[in-house]
Image (cartoon, rainbow, N blue to C red):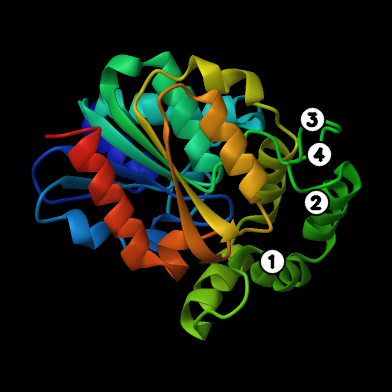
């Protein structure tokens, strides 16, 4: 019953056979965001897709006001999912906040993780001068969260071009916009508070799992300085820079993202 319960709880989809790759979506999204990347690995790996609680087609009754008030609660969900599905030797590919969710999960259960791939990670989105630039002032974050509460569509209209950057196909831009618009307003607002007001910088040196950081050169959500900071704080980590714009390389630069994940799998987390 544990596996079936977990599959229903997180809307789990499993395809392929081989070493396990788990793909975790970012804030305001769901597993459909991986449609340009995940299928490329189904011939060689067991590919696991899921929705965080309160997102996509997950079981919204599993949302817990206390546990999900911090991203540590989502990391607990990930580890419970791995246990229930009896998955180990996992390479966890996390976008944005899920990069840190995967990192926290690996700290708690390192024996289950063979590697971490962080796409656009940020341990702290708020600037902390003079030594840390997260990309936002606290007033910026408060304004976004207030807008989300009063005008979800307007919030999505504003946030989508910021996240995606310039020069991308209308199809991928609309995919993100539709996802943001369809989100549950209450849960999304609380998730935003957990994501954008959290501070997990102190957790980075605790990561012992082989790690790849993938950074986009022009990212308004997690600037290059943040990616470089994450790289410096995780001993032995690898860092790759995609010359482009936006915070979603799996949507806007899927071929490069696939190539970098494959490189990491071959060099740092072989079958």
Which mark is nearer the camera, 1 or 3?
3
**Residue named by callout 2:** 145
**Would you place residue 211 above or below residue 152 in this image?**
above
Q: Is residue 17 left or right of residue 181?
A: left
Decide: few, some or many residues near mark 4? Use Cα within 10 Å; few <14, some 14-19, many ≥20. Answer: some
Distance between the alpha carbons at the discs numbered 1 and 3 = 24 Å
**Residue named by callout 1:** 162
Nearest the viewer among 78 and 40 is 40
Q: Is residue 114 left or right of residue 136?
A: left
- Residue at (21, 27) in percent of width and height: 89
Q: Is residue 260 left or right of residue 125?
A: left
Q: Position of residue 51 (x, y in %)?
A: 42, 48
Element on which disc 4 rests: loop
**Residue named by callout 3:** 131
Q: Give the quarter of the figure containing the C terminus.
A: top left
Q: Residue furthest bottom?
A: 170
- Using the image, tell me which numbered label, if any, was put on residue 229: none
């Amino acid at each position: 019953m544990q596996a079936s319960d977990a599959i229903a709880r997180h809307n789990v989809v499993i395809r392929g056979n081989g070493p396990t790759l788990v793909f975790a979506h970012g804030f305001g999204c769901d597993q459909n965001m991986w449609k340009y990347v995940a299928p490329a690995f189904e011939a060689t790996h067991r590919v696991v897709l899921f929705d965080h609680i309160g997102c996509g087609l997950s079981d919204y009754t599993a949302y817990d006001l206390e546990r999900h008030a911090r991203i540590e609660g989502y990391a607990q969900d990930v580890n419970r999912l791995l246990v229930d599905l009896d998955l180990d030797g996992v390479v966890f590919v996390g976008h944005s906040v899920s990069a840190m969710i995967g990192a926290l999960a690996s700290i708690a259960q390192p024996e289950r993780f063979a590697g971490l791939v962080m796409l656009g990670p940020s341990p702290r989105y708020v600037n902390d001068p003079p030594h840390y630039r997260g990309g936002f002032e606290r007033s910026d974050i408060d304004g976004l969260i207030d807008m989300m509460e009063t005008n979800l569509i307007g919030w999505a209209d504003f946030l989508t071009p910021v996240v995606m950057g310039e020069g991308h196909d209308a199809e991928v831009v609309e995919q993100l916009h539709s996802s943001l618009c369809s989100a549950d307003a209450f849960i999304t607002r609380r998730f935003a508070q957990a994501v954008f007001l959290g501070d997990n910088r102190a957790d980075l040196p605790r990561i012992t799992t082989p790690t790849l950081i993938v950074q986009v050169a022009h990212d308004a959500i997690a600037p290059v300085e943040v990616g470089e900071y994450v790289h410096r704080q995780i001993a032995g980590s690898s860092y790759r820079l995609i010359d482009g714009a936006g915070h979603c390389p799996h949507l806007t630069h899927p071929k490069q993202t696939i190539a970098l994940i494959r490189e990491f799998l071959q060099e740092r987390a072989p079958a």
